[in-house]
Amino acid sequence: MLFAAFPVTEVIVSSLLGLIVGGLIGFIVRVAVVEKGFQNAKNKSQGIIDNAFSQAERIKKEKLLEAKQEIYNLKQENEKILKEKRREVQVIENKLHQREELLERRSSNLDKREVNLDRKEEILDNRKSAIDEKNFQLEKIINEQNSKLLEIANFSLEQAREVIMKRVEEDMAEDIDRYLRDEEEKARSEAQKTAREIITNSIQKYAQEVTSETTVSVVTLPNDEMKGRIIGREGRNIRALEALTGVDLIIDDTPEAVVLSGFDPIRREIAKKSLETLIADGRIHPARIEEIVEKTRVEVDQFIRDKGDEAVFETGIGRIHPDLTKLIGRLNFRTSYGQNALRHSIETAFLAGKMAVELGENEIIAKRAGLLHDIGKAVDHEMQGSHVEIGYSLAKKYREPKEVLDAIISHHGEQEATTIIGVLVAAADALSAARPGARSESLENYINRLAQLEEISSEVKGVDQAFAIQAGREVRVVVKPNEVDDAKTHVIAKEIKERIEERLSYPGTIKVTVIRETRAQDIAK
């Protein structure tokens, strides 16, 4: 059994030894492998570290270069700013230096002037003393001479003064007339030039078409048969229409036309529109006439208000009392020498406004005064007094500005204007009335005005003949040369002008020309 067990034990031992040896070898191999892996890892780590150090060094150098470049750029910018500041400081220093030099020069000049003034003051004091002394001596001599002259001439002081003044007046009369003539011509030339510029600018900025209204209205009929329908049975239709409108219907032999005649233009307008509506409708009888006339009266009333609103809006004068607006609209149915009163008022407003702008006055107030200057004409046939007085009362009632009141009361020269706007409105009113085609004038009035012009001019002392020419726009006066000298002609022209302004009413202006002719005659024998 021992022999049998021994080999087993040996085998076990051998196996254990083999295992141990194998383990040692494996361990050694493993240690070698691990050591090699560790070494590889170490080498790899070292490479990574070296690479990291290399990159860090490169980044460090780049950052250092960037920092140095930025520092350099900042340094250059700072140097540029410093140079600019130094340049500005240098400029300021130069200016201060120049000012100091200028102040020094001025101070030196002032010192010199002060010295010169002191010297001149001293000289003037000496001259004044000498002049006072001479004046004293001269006055003494004059008194002595006056006393001797009075003793010689046996004149009192008042008599001597009168003689001297008369002689001086005679000697200086011609010089005074010449001086006054020159100054008057100079003033007239300047005034005409300025006025012409203002008026020309105003007219250029506002140009209104020529309008003309008639005093009667004509209604066109589709046929002559309509005349019988308008007259009606036993004339009841025409009587109803005349009674309701207050207008006369004239139905004569004029073909296809009916003439409406009446003093009130608004009633005439109502009658015209009513008749046109009845003709278009075809139903003409008293009840229908009454209905149409009442409806038309409302329409015309609204038309008047619309016309007033349009005029206020067109002129741009701002808010205005509704009653005044309606009165402005009524001017559309009034005429003056054939000129529509509303268009005339609007035109006057624009012209006054443009002239006010040229003179630096309130344009809105000037337009307002121009639009309302003839407001009295809207109701002057219903109230007593002239349209100027009525218009002034209405404007005052509705609390219009004082410039507007002044323009209304003074635009026809009945009172003197107290404001510049009053003068402008009067001028604009004359311009609107005087422009070509604005107004018509009857032949009788025209002939009377020419005769009055010649009569007024002939009344002046020294006038030989007077002729009204250019449709009464100019009067030429021939004076007696043996009674009137050249200097006196200007006095006569001024006197005639004043008489015309005082005694005549006329649109526009009248030119006065005085002519003096010198003739030398002799007879050969």
Image: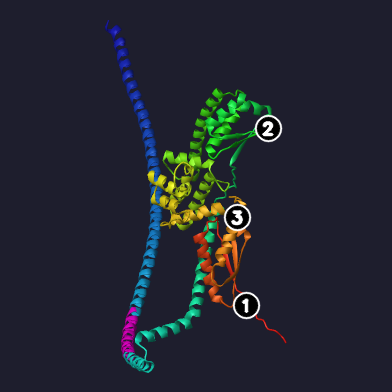
Mark 3 highlights which residue?
Answer: 446
The CA span between labels 2 and 1 is: 67 Å
Mark 1 highlights which residue?
Answer: 518
- Residue 357 x %, y %: 47, 54
* Residue 402 is inside the magenta segment: no
Q: Secondary structure at mark 1?
A: loop
Discs 3/1, front: 3
Q: Mark 3 vs mark 2: which is more N-terminal?
A: 2
Q: Which residues are magenta?
A: 110-135
Q: Nearer the viewer, residue 393 or 59?
A: 393
Q: Nearer the viewer, residue 254 or 485?
A: 254
Q: Check disc 3: other Cα within 10 Å, few if <14, some if 14-19, many if 20+.
A: some
**Which quadrant of the figure has residue 271?**
top right
The residue lying at 52 percent from left, 68 percent from top is 494
The residue lying at 53 percent from left, 45 percent from top is 341
* Disc 1 residue type (three-letter): Thr
Q: Is residue 70 above or below residue 130?
A: above
* Residue 115 is inside the magenta segment: yes
Q: Could you tell me if residue 49 is visible in this image? A: yes
